Amino acid sequence: MKTPLRFVLLCAGLLLAAPAFANSPSPEGFVKAKQSELSTLMKQGKTNAVEQKIGAVFDQMLDYDTLAKESLGEQWDQRTDAERKEFQDVLKRLVQKNYKKNLRKTLDYEVEYKGESKAKKGVMVRTVARNKKNSREEPVSVDYVLHDVSGKWLVFDIVTEGSSLISTYKNQFRRVIKKKGFDGLIKQMKAKLDDEAA
C-alpha cells in the first residue's frame, strides 16, 4: 500500500520544523531573557549607545502594531494610513519612555516568575516584583501578555496590579478624542513626550 504523497510531505514539514520550534524559548523564557537584557543595559548608565541598544531590545520584544490597533479601538478603522503611522510612532516612543522609567524604579527589585497561563488572545507570563531594600513594601504583580507573530513571541499588553496597559490607554484615548478629536490626541501625546524626562 502506497503512502499518500501529502502525508509524506506533511511529515517532512514537521520534521524540518521541529528543531526550530524546540530551540525557541517559551513565553516565560522570552520575557525573562529580554528583561534581563534591559536591566543589564539600564545599569550601564544613560548614553546614546546604551539608549540605542535599549531601543533595539524593545523592538525585539514589543508588538507595537497590535498595541496601537487595540488601544485606539474603533477609531483605528476610521483613520488614514498616514494617521495610523503617526499614532503608532508617537505611541511607540511613549511606551518606551514609560517602560524605561518603570525599569529604572525597579532595578533594585527581585522579580519572581510565576509561570504561564492562557490569556484571551495569547499567553500570560506572571511575575511578582519585590523591593530588595525594603521588605515592608508591598510586592507588585506585573504580567506580560504575549502572542506568536510569524513564529516569534511578542508582548502586546502589560498588566500591572490587574490594570491592562491597552485598556488604560484605550479609555484615555477615547476620552481625549471625544473632547479634542484625533489631532488633539496626537498633540497631547507629543506634549507628554516633551514634558517627561526619559
Image (cartoon, rainbow, N blue to C red):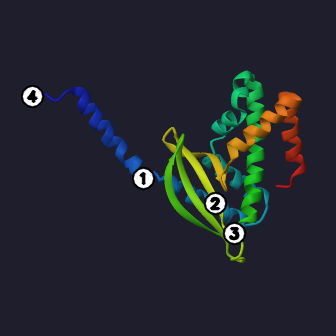
Q: Quadrant of the C terminus?
A: bottom right
What amino acid is labelled 2 in the image?
Answer: Ser
- The disc, 3 or 4, on the residue closer to the chain's N-terminal end is 4
Marks 3, 4: nearer the viewer:
3
Taking the spot 78% from the left edge, 56% from the top edge, the residue there is: 48
Q: Secondary structure at mark 4?
A: loop
Q: Secondary structure at mark 3?
A: loop
| Label 3: few (<14), some (14–19) or many (≥20) C-alpha neighbours in 10 Å | few
Q: Which residue is mark 4?
A: 1
Q: Residue 144 placed where, x, y %? A: 60, 52
> Disc 4 vs disc 1: Cβ atoms closer than 8 Å?
no
Q: Is residue 69 left or right of residue 115?
A: right
Taking the spot 32% from the left edge, 40% from the top edge, the residue there is: 14
Q: Which residue is mark 2?
A: 141
- The disc, 2 or 4, on the residue closer to the chain's N-terminal end is 4
- The disc, 4 or 1, on the residue closer to the chain's N-terminal end is 4
- The disc, 3 or 1, on the residue closer to the chain's N-terminal end is 1
Q: Residue 91 placed where, x, y %? A: 76, 40
Q: Secondary structure at mark 2?
A: strand
Q: CA distance from mark 2 to mark 4?
A: 58 Å
Q: CA distance from mark 4 to mark 1?
A: 36 Å
| Label 4: few (<14), some (14–19) or many (≥20) C-alpha neighbours in 10 Å | few
Residue 54 vertical placement versus 17 (above, below): below
What amino acid is labelled 3 in the image?
Answer: Glu
Residue 53 vertical placement versus 179 (above, below): below
Q: Where residue 23 is drawn, which disc sits there?
A: 1
> Disc 3 vs disc 4: Cβ atoms closer than 8 Å?
no
What amino acid is labelled 1 in the image?
Answer: Asn
Q: Which residue is mark 3?
A: 138
What amino acid is labelled 4 in the image?
Answer: Met
